[in-house]
Image: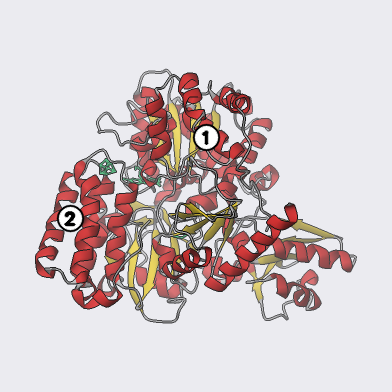
Amino acid sequence: MAITLYVPRDTTARALGADRVAARIERGARARDVALNLVRNGSRGLFYLEPLIEVDTPEGRVAYGPVTPGDVDALIEAGLFEGRQDHALSLGLTEEIKYLKRQQRLTFSRIGITDPVSLEDYTALRGFEGLKKALSLDSQAVVDEVKTSGLRGRGGAAFPTGIKWQTVHDQPPGEKYVVCNADEGDSGTFADRLVMECDPYMLIEGMTIAGLATGADQGYIYLRSEYPLAHDILDEAIERAVAAGYLGDNILGSGRTFHLEVRLGAGAYICGEETSLLESLEGKRGLVRAKPPLPAIEGLFGRPTVVNNVLSLAAVPFILDQGGQAYADYGLGRSRGTLAIQLAGNVKRGGLVELAFGTSLSELMEGFGGGTLSGRPLKAVQVGGPLGAYLPQSQWDNPIDYEGFAAFGGVVGHGGVVMFDDSVDMGDQARFAMEFCSVESCGKCTPCRIGAVRGVEVIDRIRAGESADKNLVLLTELCETMVDGSLCAMGGMAPFPVQSVMQHFPDDLTPRQAATAGGTTC
Amino acid sequence: MSQTHSPVADAWTPAQLQAVIDAHSRMPGAMLPTLHAIQDRFGFIPDAAVPMIAEALRHTRAEVHGIISFYHHFRTHPPGRSVIQICRAEACQSVGSRQLEAHARKALGIDYHQTTPDHEFTLEPVYCLGNCACGPSVRVNDDVYGRMSPEQFDQLTDELSATVVEVK
Ligand SMILES: Cc1cc2nc3c(=O)[nH]c(=O)nc-3n(C[C@H](O)[C@H](O)[C@H](O)COP(=O)(O)O)c2cc1C
Ligand code: SF4
Ligand code: FES
């Protein structure tokens, strides 16, 4: 009987050598005349263990990791093909790995278990059950189910998804669109990528349900060009879903239609902002549009448009299949359901942690993350991407939920948690926040376009010891001008990391550091 | 890992450009798909393409120029055989990407947005590759590499140069 063995194919596993590991395993099996069924599954999201390989056994899947190509022969000698657990890289039953077992995976229930493009694998684990349910309901009932779930947008602004859908639903019939925001530009985030690379049908299903709910029959996935693998996998999944009747004309014989297409971005962070994204999809420069009108009323090509993050849409199949209440049963306060936390940066055990809202950062960074990779003390953590504040230790015990974080100036955003050890120079980080804004500003409004450039200059002067006190006052005012006067959250929030450094790490923004100062230009 | 989609930064003819443009010009919002298709095929967007795109998509040349220059991804000059992108974003900074980028510039003798004189390498900044738990991250053509140390960087560029020699 053939042995079934799994080697993940997501970007991180491959970046750490998974393809070479797979090749070595195949060679080893051939040399030993072992009949091998090698599956390129998705990643479980336990990146500190990648490449994490698994073998089917009567007791369940057993895991080994992190495996380098050089480990493969020894692993085979130690009984890899029999699932023996004698080698130092043995991890036991995958499902029993604590990092995984302690999670509450509602959205990410299938990643790493399935072959991402196998429809058979997807449907075996309740795939398309949500779609079938949606096809049996009228559109208002679908919207209501999403409202019941309490789902709020996972792209950053946390706007209630059901209410957004209602607005599009209520527009007169005609051309409408569902646009998935897959621009995932925040440093420290990879959950959208995991959905697209490891469980693409879930996104396809979620978007199709959004189309049924709102009366849209065309969808676009606006995917960042930095994700070539996600692009290939999505294209293949869409093609297969159409061929099998889950997508396209006459979905599952219902007479309903939903077409879906991937469109690539082109390396502009601002195109993650929804109106900039729509401009880009229309083929223009990604200049932010003034709101109103809301995209839900006048969006793509001037038509009513749902714009949702990948994770918001990916939560929908569960909500339709299990009921909105089943999702709302998780969470804290007005933050319902689960949050995909992404442990990144200087972390010993980085990866995806899906948990109900309400866990503390300390629990995540220590309990899951195991502290820093370098082993040095943790100094600061940036949550919510490049526009999020740097949080000092005094703020790590707050439970993560949207309102709780906002209360102390934190940003949950897309759930990225980037850890820094005590070797970080927070002055560099403050400078980078302004530099990033100057590189990525769309240029439409002055506070952001000019302010960010000035911000870099002022920080450089402070660090060079030129009238430091006067320039600190100037920096404070500049930040306030950007926060108050910018058209969108790019210029409006870019000062947050800078202000947090001034407030919590003032020693790093003094001329004392001048000796080591000097960022990079690009 | 294999080197996929290595940009071939040379030959194009007006007829080829026109064929690529015509294959995309009728889709809604055709501009970005058209620009991507040209760059994927020829490695960059030749100046000669601008009036052709303007004509096909009913824009002014200035608008087409404006769109190309707005997006960091699009280039207007032929790149080297390997485009090396180094992640400059925060998660990679926390594990040493600033040292890596300093090393890369020195080792290759070029700055960002430049190409080595032998046309082997073009160096570009990138802001996140979605590999943030295992940085510093580097992308070469369509392959991503994680946990990249300066030594591994040298090894990688050596291997890439060697591949180029074999291909010739
Ligand atoms: C500068 C900027 C960048 C953004 N980048 C993203 C992004 O990469 N992905 C995303 O889903 N939302 C991003 N957003 C938020 C979107 O504007 C929008 O709120 C979101 O796509 C709505 O979907 P949701 O309700 O499902 O979150 C960004 C916003 C700003 C201001
Ligand atoms: S704040 Fe910046 S990114 Fe936003 S509209 Fe103004 S210039 Fe554009
Ligand atoms: S920050 Fe470098 S890969 Fe995300």
Q: Is residue A14 above or below residue B152?
A: above
Q: Is residue A462 left or right of residue A158?
A: left
Find residue A186 and report its horizontal and vertical position in percent: 40, 54
User: Given contact means CB atoms under 8 Å apart, are the residues at marks 1 and 2 in contact?
Assistant: no
Residue under label 2: A479
| Image quarter of the N terminus of chain A | bottom right
Against A363, residue B19 (above or below) is above
The answer to whether residue A201 of the structure is visible from this angle is yes
Q: Position of residue B155 (x, y in %)?
A: 62, 69
Q: Point out the residue furthest to the front here.
A: B117
Residue B148 vs A387, above or below: the answer is below
Residue named by callout 1: B46
Residue A303 in view here: no
Q: Amino acid at mark 1?
A: Pro
Is residue A456 left or right of A150 when viewed as pictured? Answer: left
Quick one: which residue is furthest to the right in this view? A33
- Viewer-closest of B161 and A178: B161
Q: Amino acid at mark 2?
A: Cys
Q: Nearer the viewer, residue B69 or A382?
A: B69
Residue occupying image coordinates x 59% and y 49%: A229
Q: Secondary structure at mark 2?
A: helix
Q: Distance of mark 1 from mark 2, alpha carbons?
A: 40 Å
